[in-house]
Image (cartoon, helix red, strand yellow):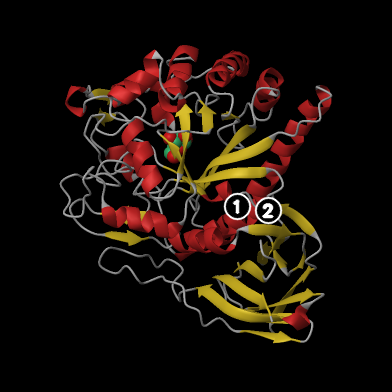
Amino acid sequence: MSMKAQLYLDTSYRLAKVDKRMFGAFIEHLGRGIYTGIYEPEHPLADQDGFRRDVAELVRELGVPVIRYPGGNFVSAYNWEDGVGPVEKRPTKLDLAWRVIETNQVGTNEFASWARRVGSEVMMAVNLGTRGIDAAMNLVEYANHRGGSYWSDLRREHGYAEPHGIKMWCLGNEMDGPWQIGHKTAEEYGRLAAEAARAMRKVDPAIELVVCGSSHRDMPTFPEWEVTVLDHTYDLVDYISMHQYVGNRENDLGYFLAQTEGVDQYIRSVKATCDYIKAKKRTAKVMNISFDEWNVWYHSNETDRYVEPWSFAPPLLEDVYNLADALVVGLYLITLLKHADRVKIACMAQLVNVIAPIMTRKGGGVWRQTTFYPFHHVSRYGRGTVLQTILDSPTYDSREYTDVKLVNAAVVLSDDETELTVFAVNRDQESDITLECCFSSAGGMEVIEHIVLENGDVMATNTEEHPDKVVPHSQGRSVMKSDRLVAEMPALSWHVIRMKRR
Ligand code: AHR
């Protein structure tokens, strides 16, 4: 007999409205993210500003309302002033974070203009590693002040009469990490972040601020870092950041697919830590989460060790993703949706070439990796309200995690309340599972599309030569049976089941 999972839902049991910024991404000055990624003036498809039109088109298609920039580790030794003004006068510098050459051909203005063209807002990080309050507040003035002051007039002189109006700002990057240039203790960072926040907000009171949480859940200073940093900054910032990458380093698929359970636990712990400070401060303010680096990252770890130092735009972190990775990305998105009450911003790291859903070849083509698809689906159909659901599923045990549900799922009700979308993954490596969705008003619903991402080979990848090896199809098998939806989920597959009120 085939296995069965059951999902119980009612459209009046709602968790939270999804903030569209949950579908953000990240572009760092790293490897070929910028140079020969989004920007390649010599490419036949480059626009008048040197940005590739074919890449911009795929970024638009993916649907990323916000893009974090310019780092990442890079930002902790970056002088933003090097990246503005006449391009021919910009200095070529050593990027100490990635040990490469940075030519500064792209900087704040070029990136902000490009982001607007692809339909995204910029989420800007400031350098709190080698620099501090002065550089941070000057950048806010340069980017957001209308004119009539030194830094805003400098932007106008540089050819940008209108301010960029950047709303979201990150107070540094992963400052708890010893690998970070200008790494700080929680006490040092908490004080600096608080003072930088005060100054930046004086320049532009409309900005939103993200303070650095831990770099990942296994950091020895987690969650003490959050406690100390929030003690200094709770009233001054809007979000605390979370970062977490997962990978199949052990070549253990069951364990790999279970790793989003760890992400779920990590989010619960960060929420609890924020609420501890909330209680301690006797405040009504709720600290939200900006999960501004998440993804699968492991394929390129070994080859990256052999990259020649001090080269320009070398291939770094160029993970080639397979179907298993796409399933984990789907599971990651389901996990984030289930925490939509507190996770308001999330950035898939990264966007182009660097652990990315979009890949390019210098002078050549652009293609979608397997991970492009689940992200695209959730960004497109996951905007609305996440429902509170009860999920009954057969389980399995893996290393580190027990009782892992073979099926994981989240349900989103569209803003106009006419569409319901189920996002689901079957983690089982051998068996198909029947998913039954039992809901109160099923009589009035019909399935309008059942998208499936599957492949006989879980290791299958997309390449420039074979870009369509792993692509979704809309032949998913689901039927509406009076009060329930019955959907078939083949082993190792991703599903988007869209229903509409009749
Ligand atoms: O996204 C790659 C790197 O991962 C970022 O630069 C850093 O913030 C994180 O450790």
Mark number, residue 259:
1
Mark 2–mark 1 CB contact (< 8 Å): yes
Mark number, residue 401:
2
Q: Quadrant for ligand 1? A: top left
Of label 2 and label 1, which has the lower sequence position?
1
Query: In the rendering, at what x and y percent does residue 67 appear?
Result: 45, 42
Q: Which residue is drawn at 44% across and 58% down?
A: 62
Place residue 147 in its image quadrant.
top left
Along the line of sight, which residue is nearer the eye, 133 or 37?
A: 133
For label 2, count other residues whose C-alpha is less than 10 Å away and answer few (under 14), some (14-19) or many (20+).
some
In the depicted structure, whether residue 113 falls above or below residue 200:
below
Quarter placement of the C terminus: bottom right
Relative to 41, 132 lies left or right: right
Between the C-alphas of marks 2 and 1, the distance is 8 Å
Q: Which residue is drawn at 56% across and 45% down?
A: 346
Q: Which element is circle 1 on? A: helix
Q: Can residue 398 be seen in this view?
A: no
In the image, what residue type sits under mark 2? Tyr
Place residue 368 in its image quadrant.
bottom left
Q: Which residue is drawn at 36% across and 23% down?
A: 80
Quarter placement of the N terminus: bottom right
Q: Which element is circle 2 on? A: loop
In the depicted structure, whether residue 124 falls above or below residue 355:
above
Query: In the rendering, at what x and y percent does residue 336 appear?
Result: 63, 51
Query: Is label 1 within 8 A of ligand 1 (CB to nearest ligand atom)?
Result: no
In the depicted structure, whether residue 69 falls above or below residue 432:
above
